[in-house]
Image (cartoon, rainbow, N blue to C red):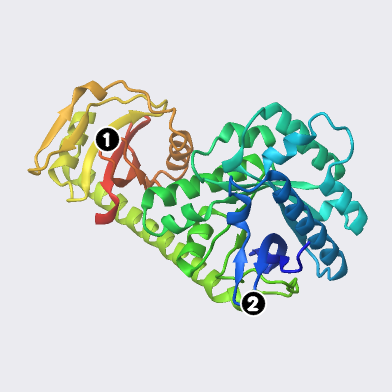
Amino acid sequence: MPPQIVPFYQPIVSIDTCEILGYEVLGRKITANKIDSLGPFFHDSQIDVEEKLNVDRYLRKTALENFEKYYTGGMLFINIQPQWIYRFKDIPEQLPTLEFICRAGVPEEKIVIEISESEFQGDMELLVELICRYRQAGCKIAIDDVGCGFSNMDRIIHLHPDFLKIDASLVKKSGREELTACLLESMGLFSERMGLELIFEGIENREQFAAGLRAGARHYQGFFFSPPGPQLLPRENWSDVLEKDLKGHVAVEACLLERQLIQAQKMNAFLNSLIYRYRPQTIEEYIDCFIRAAPSEWFRIYVCDEKGFQQTPNYIKNNDGRWSNQPEYQNRYWGWRPYFVPTIAKVKQIAKGLFSDPYYDLSTRERITTFCYPLVRNMFLYIDCNFRRL
């Protein structure tokens, strides 16, 4: 094998320990003038598969030998293309990578097998069966490039990996597109519920790192932390490097929460004063007094009972500032929304109104927040507000 083909290692940093979790193996071709990624080589359909396999196996074998020789702690993430695994469906012998691991003397639990989500092909049941051979040997499993192309959550659930690596393109978009940021946050929630560890890769700047923190990612990879290199970096504590960003994240989140609580206090005081002033007796009278004094950020008002059924029409502010109603919404059931029951329970317990977290409204497609306020006889007022105007 030509000596200019070498494995490089890019650290994956964990923010809970401020240490390196592990290193992803990346192929590089070194010439007199530059260092090139082997990514285009492996994805070139004109190059014979056997040639790719030979290069790939050389990189894996060399990386494992270096990992054992210069081990500084952590795990080694090895990329394997799914279509190459299928070649072993009828071969009971040990998979080549497992042989390399054994020969190098590296504990299997230190190895993470990365399967690219964007390259899943063929029989899913067979892929699961083959991946289980790595898992049974003691290796962990990661799904790479989640979010690249059309992600299939069913495949992810089927494989139930240990790690999910979020595609760099989504991370880069998250700072510019709010919907993408929401998707990343959903991925964080999905990973938490599934017991998966989330890795944000392709992090190039503080904004992308902050997007990962907001989504709840525990591990990070990218040039912002360290470029790939020919040596395994020590797992030394990175707290000095990350301290400013982590403190900044906590400060921003605390500020947002404080602002939300202050807004809730103001809203409660405002609604309490209206009720004291107008002394409403019926739900219609409550709605009428609220509409009369509605601030500019309010655009929708309605009342639900504690079981989730809407007891009034929707009262909507039109573009001209006038209010109209939508009777077709009366008796609709909203208990199916994930936040409905927890919000009602909290509001009943503290006997005060609360704001929801910001979300995108199904009707207006705008980012809004909803204030839930306790009325009489287990009725609850809902006020939808434009989030940017609060």
Q: Residue at x 27, y 55 (%)?
A: 388
Q: Which mark is residue 202?
A: none
Q: CA distance from mark 1 to mark 2?
A: 59 Å
| Kind of element beneath mark 2 | loop
Q: Amino acid at mark 2?
A: Ala
Measured as percent of width and height from the top left, residue 173 is found at 42, 55
Q: What residue sits 59% from the left and 46% below the top?
A: 46
Q: Quadrant of residue 13?
A: bottom right
- Residue 196: x, y in percent? 66, 45
> Residue under circle 2?
32
> Where, by quadrant of the figure, is residue 116 drawn?
top right
Q: Nearer the viewer, residue 389 or 277?
A: 389
Mark 2 Cα-neighbour bin, 10 Å: few <14, some 14–19, many ≥20: few
Residue drawn at x 43%, y 55% is: 174
- Label 1 belongs to which residue? 363
Mark sitting earlier along the chain (1/2): 2
Q: Position of residue 251 (x, y in %)?
A: 48, 69
Say if mark 1 contacts mark 2, CB within 8 Å. no
In this rendering, the count of numbered labels is: 2
Q: Which quadrant does the N terminus fall into?
A: bottom right
- State the residue in front, 274 or 162: 162
Q: Secondary structure at mark 1?
A: loop
Residue 390 seen in the current view: no
User: Does residue 181 appear left or right of residue 379 in this picture?
Assistant: right
Screen quadrant of the C terminus: bottom left
Question: Does residue 24 show up?
Answer: yes
Please tell me which residue is depicted at 59% across the width and 31% down the height of the picture: 154
Say what amino acid the circle numbered 1 marks: Ser
